[in-house]
Image: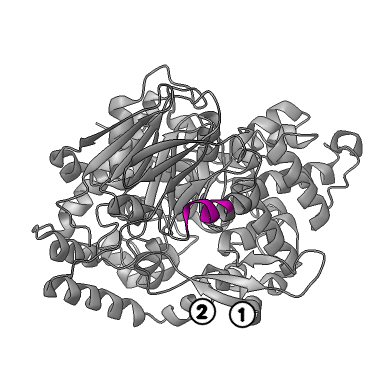
Amino acid sequence: MTTLNSAHRILEINLTDKSTAAAAIDPEVLQKVSGGRGYNVWHLLKHLPSAAQPLGPENILLMSSGQLTGTKAPVSSRLHISALSPQTGLLGSSNIGGQFGTGLRAFGYLSLKVHGRSEAPVLLVIAPDGVCFADGRTWWGLDTRQTHERILKSFGPRAQALTIGPAGENLVPFACILHGLDHAAGRTGLGAVMGSKNVKGVVITDTPKSQTAAAAQVNGSVRDFVRKVKQSPYYRDFARHGGAGSVLWCNELGFMPTRNYQAHRFPEAAKIDGRLLESATRKRTRCSRCFIGCKAELALPESRFSGRRANRPEFEPLVNLGARCGLSDLHAVVYLDNLCSRLGLDCISAAGVLAFAMELFEKGILTPEDTGGLELAWGRAEVMEALLQQIARKEGLGRILAQGVRKAAENIGRGAEAYAYEVKGLELSAYHPSRIRGTALAYAVSGRGGDFNTLYASLEYNWTADQARQAFGSAEAADPQGRAGKARMIKRAAIVNAVLDSLGLCKIPTLSLLCDFSLEEEAALYRAISGEATTAEQFLEIGERIVNLERLLNYRLGASSKDDALQDFFFEYGKGGDDWLSPLVQDFYEAMGWDADGNPP
């Protein structure tokens, strides 16, 4: 077991001169910002050159485990990856599970820093005897599945790796980083940053196995946490279906972003319900130290879009590649999600640009002449497949769509901007923001753009009115259409999410199953494992500091309060006209202690 007094080192890799160096991380920094997400933003603020470009050699790619990653803490597998984003030009930030973070800690490193640019493609190989720059030229062009299988064959079955696919190699701004076959650091284009540095993959070989027994208080704290999570009324269902089981729930509540947000319910939602995949489940899989096991491998009957080795999609790809694109063929959604992984594309942004293009075709803004003869009708899986291939390789219409909806709309013109739904250049995730206003506020103020996972405000629809009244001063905070108390609620969500990403803990047990935003359970785990008398209040202070640092970095990179907004469409939707978001944004600034322009103190 890794202890909190070890593995507080950073491994720095300079690709330009092929040098490496390891150094201790100042314990005082970790006390102020923890590891993972907090350490990354602190490091970027301190060391990112002011003239750095997202795809330039000066950009810094940081891969940092949380402070609890690699310990006996349950669900402590998470690794946080950050850089200057090629998609937004602001903070690039993404979180990934699996085994890589635990492997990094086992080698004695909390953080891996990669900068510079290799002249030719390389694999970075971290082994017991040091770092090797392996020739990656014969790997270039492989998809992520091919790369993964070849890594296991070349480096052994215990090897762990982060890889990119063709999208990262071709510098698609929303390219992702894959670990294994279906763990993705999906958002903000960090796969393109790897590609710009000519790094095909980062491999950890022969990860040491833990031999250290945990103390009795650690085991007791772990048992308490696991027992509480398993008592959640949502536990059995989530362990059985993962996030794939939430499609009908989303549709019933009216959050579904149907046909590029034109509607909030999908009439054929029952056809893409992830529960239908249970009979096809071949094997359930899990991340390091996980007792839930929300992922699964599938064996589907042979058809045009199945009959191949596949991984079960999570909630976001089912909704975004399904309802958002008008696709009701579940097996086709599974195939397209797996194709995104193989190509190394963020499935949320990829679905966003597909739905955007389909609506433009429906409105006559794009014609068959523009699309190379492709009929971009809603729900045509074969057309979606062709576009994904074009996007990953920047060919045909894909060359324009690969820019993301904001820049693609600017390029297309003809009123296309009205249908490009994004914040800070990042395509919105699954929930329809007109129907769930706290999440809409989270989209607007999130440091990485229009995304749910950095603020993960599940308390908006899981808390009772009494809980909301006690915590945030109004029962409306627990009403998805309410406004009062929402700013304080989103502040709490922002802070708690920052802490979990910095400790290296998965959010599903705490925020989805326990619906607990107190950090009391996490503080108890940390005290048992570290021996430090850390309280939930201290964690809340750390989380607020991290949110402030992310805001400062984005402002340094050129962001302003004008970026904390949604498109006019979402205020005209339904009964329309009321800009309910701007007052909520100002309330959020006030709750955070920022000025009227969103500047932290």
The residue at which mark 1 appears reads as: 278
Residue 487, position in %: x, y?
36, 50
Instruction: Give the camera-side residue of 266 and 367.
Output: 367
Question: Which dot marks residue 240?
Answer: 2
Tell me whether the residue at label 1 lies in contact with that at label 2, contact meaning CB atoms closer than 8 angstroms. Answer: yes
* SS at circle 1: helix
Residue 387, position in %: x, y?
77, 45
Q: Main secondary structure of the magenta part?
A: helix
Identity of the amino acid at label 1? Glu
- Res 595 seen here: no
Read off the magenta span.
150-156
Question: Which dot marks residue 87?
Answer: none
- Res 566 seen here: yes
Q: Quadrant of the C terminus?
A: top left
- Between discs 1 and 2, the one toward the N terminus: 2
Q: Quadrant of the N terminus?
A: bottom left
Instruction: Left or right? Give the position of 502 relative to 360.
Output: left
Instruction: Give the camera-side residue of 465 and 492.
Output: 492
Identity of the amino acid at label 2? Arg
